[in-house]
Amino acid sequence: MTARDLSIIGAGHVGLVYAAGMAELGHRVACIDIDVDRIERLRRGELPIFEPGLDEAVCRHSASGRLRFSTSYEDALADAEFIFIAVSTPSTPDGAADLRAVRAAARGIAAAVRGRRPIIINKSTVPVGTGDSVDHILASADGHRPFKVVSNPEFLREGTALHDFFHPDRIVLGSRDRAAAERVAALYEGVNAPVLVTDVKTAEMIKYASNAFLATKISFINEIAEICEAVGADAAQVAAGMGLDARIGGHFLRHGIGFGGSCLPKDVRALAYMGSVFGTHPQLLNAVLQINAAQRRRVLQKVRTALGQLDGARICVLGLAFKPNTDDVRDAPAIDLIRLFLNEGADVTAYDPQAMTKTAVICPDAAYFASPYDAAAGCDAIIVATEWPEFQDLDLGRLRAAAARPIFVDGRGFLDRDAIEEAGFTLISGRDDASSAPVSARDRNGRAVGVSA
Ligand code: UGA
């Protein structure tokens, strides 16, 4: 492996994972962010996010000298042969992707490289065509000589991002310049994955279409689960039965309170927006979003029916992160639920192993507790909104003793219905039948198969 000098612009989730991963592969990495406080903390080994294994990897490579942090483009880009743009592209109010940070990064690069032509690799999730505008910004800011721009979308899942870096299903590289794409492919030497080289727009679209398809699977199974409930079928078993068909696959067929996070909701919105401004009618994508939003309202309605009224009720939300093993609460279903219940005049108490600090900033009117039992004290209903592994070990008897009333919602359908009911709770939403959990299916070799994320 030839060690290269890389710069990564953006010390967020994607930037930090790529910085640590590329350092681990042997490259020399300078990671840059305009947030001075963030960079100072990173230099002290303090990570701004929780991602399993990342703090250890960042510290190890900071100590080895292969990874450094900077706030200066001039400094961080001085030796770079490859520059990754990994800045965030949040949603605008109308659902489009906000590209201000990408454009600012392009202008910063052009000013810092002055005549040199490192390869620019775009990691940020950007609307189709952005690679060309980055090219345009760069070239027009620096002598109108074109740059080599490669789109290299990321497919990292939060919570397993480092693992995904080293074990991707594919590496997608989009460029007008095949040689540039191949030079970027060479950076990944040591990572065993198929490499797909396309044009820039196609690579950008692969990212959106992949996330939109995952979101579609979730909304599909949520719609099926609603029909299952109405007709008396077991949605988890239906998903397991479907997932055994290799053409369908068992992943992303867990029904519940829907998808959240910084990617799936934002990317489906951005793709639908993109389609509509280009004159297409993305009906399926819009339905996916509508079904997802309805999942939270269905929980509200079920709890209202069970309690009679919500005004003055005390609702306990266990799990705030949009999924386990992260402290990320962006677009988390739990945040919507807290707001919906507060709007109805309920009091909300909450507990999460990692995400309470971040939630308290955006939902200051809920009360946060250091344990699930304290959060449940005196509550009228308990809603589990994140499938944290530790919730599987909850002392349900203790939880029931703490709660005032026995209403229980398993928003992720992962807890044992029998155990919840034996503890004295009434499960108004959750796994239909514990004894028929989807993993009970076996393949011809006797291996458990079924539904997973
Ligand atoms: C997602 C994609 O899975 C990654 O491939 C992609 O790289 C990433 O977005 C991104 O664009 O950066 P992530 O946001 O980490 O990754 O989360 P997922 O694991 O996809 O889960 C998203 C949401 O769907 C979570 O709220 C999860 O609870 C929910 N989900 C997932 C379900 O409700 N049901 C399922 O069956 C699976």
Image: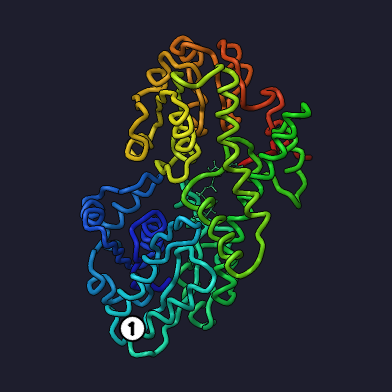
Quadrant of the image for the N terminus?
A: bottom left
**Residue 258 quadrant:** top right
Q: Quick one: label 1, few (<14), some, or many (20+) residues within 10 Å?
A: some
Q: Which colour scheme is used?
A: rainbow
Q: Where is residue 398 in the image (x, y as percent from the top left)?
A: 46, 12
Residue 190 or 347: which is nearer the viewer?
A: 347
Q: Please tell me whether residue 80 is drawn above or below residue 312 in the rendered image.
A: below
Image quadrant where one finds the C terminus = top right
* Relative side of 26 to 152, left or right: left
Please state the total of marks drawn on the protein image. 1
Q: Which residue is drawn at 47% across and 27% down?
A: 344
What's under tag 1, amino acid-wise? Answer: Ala
Residue 266 in percent (x, y) is at: 50, 54
> Could you tell me residue 452's position as x and y percent?
62, 41
Residue identified by numbered label 1 = 141
Residue under the image location 22 percent in, 58 percent down: 36
Does residue 189 appear left or right of residue 8 in this picture?
Answer: right
